[in-house]
Amino acid sequence: MDTKRIDLLNLDTHELTGLVVGWGEPVYRVKQIQHWLYHELASDFDAMSNLPHALRARLRQTTSIGTLTPRAEQQSVDGLTRKTLFQMADGQTVETVLMRYLDAPGSPEDAADAPNIARRTVCVSTQVGCPVGCPFCETGQAGYVRNLTFGEIVAQVIHFARAEKAAHSDSALTNIVIMGMGEPFMKFNVTWRAIEAFTDSARLGMGARRITVSTSGYVDGIQQLLAKNSQVNLAVSLHAADDALRDQLVPVNRKYPLRELMQACREYVHQTHRRITFEYALMDDINDSPAHAQAVAQLVRGLLCHINLIPLNPTSRAPYRRSPQARVQQFEKILRAADIPTTLRVEKGIEIAAGCGQLRQQVDARRAHSVS
């Protein structure tokens, strides 16, 4: 990919207008181009049949429709989860996952039957690597390289929107979760521009309530989200209910301790009247005891929230292991007994390394082995 080309997915409406009008084209061309990019999901300029040939030629010569190239892909046995490793113009790679949920239990064959799919959720990444450095996370242990542009974030969604449309013409994505590789709030403005692209009716046009952004606990980012008066859902990676343990598991806690984080969460609920989700990865003999469960219940008591319990998806580099099923069930039971709404996450794609950063690590390891 020619890095000198202008990525159209990295332009908002104002920027695209400046480009097109600067070429001497009428402003209505902007709406036409956006329709082809985001509604028709065109992957090449030849498809844009209502644009003049000269404009299509100029677009082809000077711009691109995204800068991501699929390099590896894995699909779960049931066909419901698919992870793609994308390479960007500078050679860096990032992962995205599509998760399809049946409206009722069925056989693996049902996964290919569009009417049985209730939700199609894309989990997007915002950074190459992650600077937070959580020791149980493959991405965190791989280190941080750079932030994605908002166009690179949007391109991940466009890729799977095209794929679903190609498979079933009436099958649109229903949800977006910004909880893949990286910390979305570390560069809030970039993440927000992507959210604007997702919700803008001229672009992807998805309802804000169908979008969830997950943070490791960046209080500044939560406050900036509040300032936007948005109905975007908020999830927080909790993983511990005391500062000493959370300092180890989620190092950003040293900057934003639980007292500050929980105050920001309460402000979010008070202002938006929306439930907040706390993600809690259960790790064997680390944070999964009855005492830990009781501490979580005490921490969130009285807050409009939901606890999403996640049996850890083990990584190749860390000693952390998932909690035994009996302990997971005990943890869930304690939270429910305290009237804390709790679910045990339905695992999607564990056999295809669907945890953040795992496919990237596998591909890098194979590449290193082939070179040696």
Image (cartoon, rainbow, N blue to C red):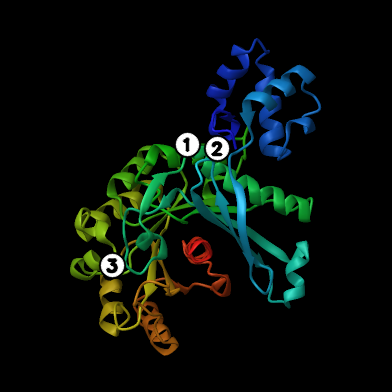
Q: Is residue 112 above or below residue 19?
A: below
Q: Which mark is residue 249?
A: 3
Dot 2 falls on a residue whose secondary structure is helix
Which mark sits nearer the N-terminus, 2 or 3?
A: 2
173, above or below 320, in the image: above
Pick out the residue farthest to the front: 372
Q: Residue at x 45, y 48 (%)?
A: 126
Answer with mark 1 or mark 3, whichever residue precedes in sequence: 1
Whether residues under marks 1 and 3 lie with C-beta atoms below 8 angstroms apart, the answer is no
Q: Is residue 317 visible?
A: yes
Q: Which residue is mark 1?
A: 193
> Which quadrant, please, contains the N terminus?
top right
Q: Residue at x 34, y 57 (%)?
A: 216
**Image x and y of residue 144, in percent:** 36, 52
Vertical order, 327 against 209 (above or below):
below
Q: Is residue 99 visible?
A: no
Residue 247: give x, y in percent of width and height. Answer: 22, 64
Please tell me how crowded label 1 is: few (under 14), some (14-19), or many (20+) other residues with Cα within 10 Å: some
Labelled pair 2, 1 in contact (Cβ < 8 Å)? yes
Residue type at mark 3 is: Leu
What secondary structure is marked by label 3?
A: helix
Badge nearest the viewer, 2 or 3: 3
SS at mark 1? helix
Disc 2 to disc 1, C-alpha distance: 6 Å
Which percent across, then down, holds residue 15?
53, 23
**Disc 2 target residue:** 197
Q: Is residue 47 above or below residue 80?
A: above
Q: Residues within 10 Å of mark 2 (few under 14, many from 20)?
A: many
